[in-house]
Amino acid sequence: MAQRTPGSLVDHDSVFRPHGTPPFEPDRRFALRRPVKLQCYLREPGSSPFVMDVVELSRAGFRAETIFRLSPGHTVWLTIPAFAALESQVVWRKNSLYGCRFHHPLHEAVFDHVVNLTNAGR
């Protein structure tokens, strides 16, 4: 069972799970997820960055699609345009979709700003 620290808004162990995968216990997501359409750069340590499409974003992490193969458990760096790179961990993979968790959750204002930017372009 996932442990939460006092004041934590994010239950990292249940935020990202591939669609159709049954939870080990009732779904306890605390992070609001929003559909987005962002072309971002992703980089593994020691590798060159590549473009990937982020299709869902929360303060705790993101879901993305790419033709490049990533391994669950690996550390990656996501660069959202106009923001510093964010250290993340690949949590799951299903075909070309990946769920990743931020090592430090996004600030609420940053999350709102990115979501509003992507919705303005629709």
Image: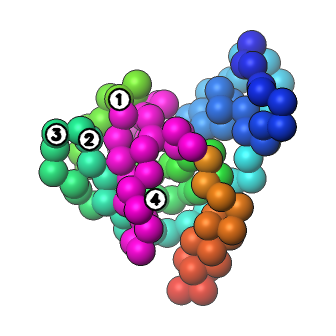
Task: Say left or right for 104 vs 7.
Answer: left
As measured in the structure, the alpha-carbon distance from the residue carrying label 2 to the one carrying label 1 is 8 Å
Mark 2 and 3 residues: CB-CB less than 8 Å, in contact?
yes
Residue 76 is situated, as x and y percent measured from the top left of the image, at 35, 41
Would residue 35 be visible to someone looking at this image? yes
Residue at screen point 57% across, 71% down: 114
Residue under numbered circle 1: 74
Q: Nearer the viewer, residue 67 or 38?
A: 38
> Which is more N-terminal, label 4 or label 1?
4
Which amino acid type is marked by label 2? Glu
Residue 15 is situated, as x and y percent measured from the top left of the image, at 66, 37
Mark 2 and 1 residues: CB-CB less than 8 Å, in contact?
yes
Residue under numbered circle 3: 46
Which amino acid type is marked by label 4? Val
Which portion, as a residue range, is magenta? 75-104
Helix, strand, or loop for circle 3? loop
Q: Residue 111 has which mark?
A: none
